[in-house]
Image (tube, helix red, strand yellow):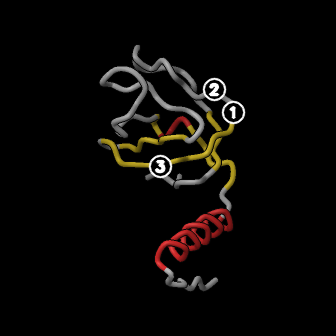
Amino acid sequence: MCDLRALDVVECIDDTPVLKQSAVMPKAGHLYRVQSVRRVGDGFSVRLFELSPKCHLGGPCNCGNCGWDSGRFRLAHRREEDKLSILRAFLSKMETRTGVVPEVVD
């Protein structure tokens, strides 16, 4: 099971490359923000806002299937209010485009 979620702040605890194509690696002790988490095989893969992994197809990842094993990170901070502010900003843009005023209940 993986306790990490999008927008969590995580600390890298393992920066040892496993595969030779692992050219871009997070650095141990550094903090990162999680962009996404997805199931891969019997584990989970984490994408980060600050780093773009090298793609298994070659070059920087554009396929969206590359990432780092979730076991390389530990949760450092989770701020629910950050997620709420992102939702409010999104809804505000929708209101501007559609003219419909969405309601957010705290």
Q: State how far apart marks 1 and 2 are (Cα).
A: 6 Å
Query: Disc 2 on helix, strand or loop?
Result: loop
- x, y percentage for residue 4? 53, 52
Mark identifier at residue 70:
none
The residue closer to the viewer here, 105 or 11, is: 105
Mark 2 residue type: Lys
- x, y percentage for residue 44? 41, 44
Residue at coordinates 68% horizontally, 38% vertically from top-left? 31
Query: Disc 3 on helix, strand or loop?
Result: strand
Place residue 63 in its image quadrant.
top left
Q: Which residue is mark 2?
A: 27
Mark identifier at residue 30:
1
Q: Which residue is mark 3?
A: 36
Neighbours of disc 1 within 10 Å: few (<14), some (14-19), many (20+): few
Callout 1–callout 2 Cβ contact below 8 Å: yes
- Nearest to N terminus: mark 3 or mark 1: 1
Mark 1 residue type: His
Q: State how far apart marks 3 and 1 are (Cα).
A: 18 Å
- x, y percentage for residue 91? 55, 73
